[in-house]
Each structure stands twice: as structure tokens, then as C-alpha cells.
Image (cartoon, rainbow, N blue to C red):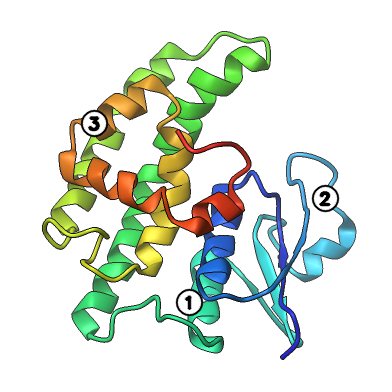
Amino acid sequence: MPTPTLYGAAYSVYVRAARLALVEKGVAYKLVEIDIFGAVPDWYAALHPFKRIPAFEHDGFRLYEAAAIMRYVDEAFAGPPLMPADPRGRARVAQIVSVADAYLYRPLVWDIYVERCDAPAEGRAPDEAKIAAAIPRVETSFAAIEELMAGERPYLLGAQLALADLHLAPMISLGRRAPEAAALLARHAQLARWWETVKTRPSLAATATRPEA
């Protein structure tokens, strides 16, 4: 079977999520670096009309949006299944992914992590008002995800690693480097235990751009 190609920057949480799915399935792949904060090549628009990342190509089939790529990888390749077999479990995966994308990603990554951790490196003061406004939004998202978890089990939906875990892990990995986000996570014991489990998976090490905190 032809080797798939993933387009995007290794630093991106969404590119990393797609890479995690590929690694967990044992799929060899090629990563073509596309830095959307730099000069995005004109040819990339044929792969992603919005010029975001990631995009994906496999044997002539093109796809973009991380969740769609991850679902395809799970279904198109051999390896351990990354979706529950039952309809309720599959619906819960979709729900957690949607919550993470719609409500968690921007306040956690852009409003807390970027302002607290990246702003000083860029020579500017963090936007404290933006951080303060993001904290309750992240708190609500953490509480909602924790409520959807399947009890005291290692992964979000129980004993089986699923796409929901791989979608959420890069956001938590990056966001919790900010002390405000780390404190919020610590207040949610079940979600914090989940992170301590998932961060030890070899796929996290294989896709890391820095050591996990």
C-alpha cells in the first residue's frame, strides 16, 4: 500500500493528533512541513483550500481536517482499532472531539498558553485580561470532558485508547505548560490521571517536539 503523506508543521496540535493516529496504527508516513505562519506555498491550496493544517494524501485520495484524517487512518489501515465498536461509544468520541475543538482549543492554547509562554519569548507582555477571560472557559471544558469520561479507567472512554484521547492529548500537552492551565487540570483529578497515563505512550514520545511536562 502506498505511503501516506501528512502536510503540516510538527509544532501544531492538530498535526500531532493526526501523527498520533498514524503511529498508534503502526503506519509509516511522510511528513511534509508546512508552516502556516510563514510563506505557505501556492500549490498547497490544492490540498487545503483554506491553507490550514493538516492536510493528507494517500494513494490519490486527499483529505483535510484532523478529525477526518484520523478517522480515515483508523479505518483504512490495519492495527488496533481506535474507535469503540458500539454506537454510543462512537458517538461519545465524536462528542469529546467536538467539545475540544469548539470550546477548549482556543482558550487553552491561544489565550492561555500563547499569552503566558510564547509572548515573553516574542518580547511582549502577556495579555493578562485574555488569560483571565480564558480560565473559566477552560474550566468549563475540563469539567465537561471529565463528566463524559467512563469512570476510573485509563482512557477517556475506558480501557481502550480511542481517537478522542489522541485528539485531546496534544492540546493538554501544550496548554498545561502554562501554570494557569496546569492548575486547572490538577483540580480535575480524573482528567489529570488520564494525562499521566496517556503521556507515557510511545506515540507521544515519537511525535513530541519537546519533552512532555
Could you say whether the residue bearing mark 2 is in a helix, strand or loop?
A: loop
**Quarter residue 183 falls in:** top left
Q: Quadrant of the N terminus?
A: bottom right
* Looking at the image, residue 45 lies above or below residue 76: above
Helix, strand or loop at disc 1?
helix
Q: Image point 60% across, 53% down: which residue?
A: 207
> Is 197 in front, or is 36?
197
- What residue did someone put label 2 on? 40
* Above or below: residue 123 compared with residue 90: above
Q: Amino acid at mark 2?
A: Val
Q: Which residue is mark 1?
A: 71
Q: CA distance from mark 3 to mark 1?
A: 30 Å
User: Label 2 crowding class (10 Å Cα cut-off): few <14, some 14-19, many 20+?
Assistant: few
Q: Earlier in the sequence, mark 1 or mark 2?
A: 2
Q: Is residue 22 left or right of residue 185?
A: right
Position of 117 compared to 58: left or right?
A: left
Q: Earlier in the sequence, mark 2 or mark 3?
A: 2
Q: Nearer the viewer, residue 53 or 33?
A: 33
Query: Horizontal and vertical percent for residue 58?
Result: 71, 82
| Kind of element beneath mark 3 | helix
- What is the crowding at mark 3: few (fewer than 14 residues within 10 Å), some, or many (at least 20)? few
Q: Disc 3 or 1, which lies upstream in sequence?
A: 1
* Nearer the observer, 160 or 109: 160
Toward the bottom, the furthest residue is: 1
Q: CA distance from mark 1 to mark 2?
A: 26 Å
Q: Closer to the camera: disc 2 or disc 3?
A: 3
Q: Looking at numbered disc 1 in the image, what kind of residue is underneath it?
A: Arg
Residue 148: x and y in percent read: 17, 58
Mark 3 vs mark 1: in front = 3
Say which residue label 3 marks. Answer: 186
Q: Is residue 101 visible?
A: no
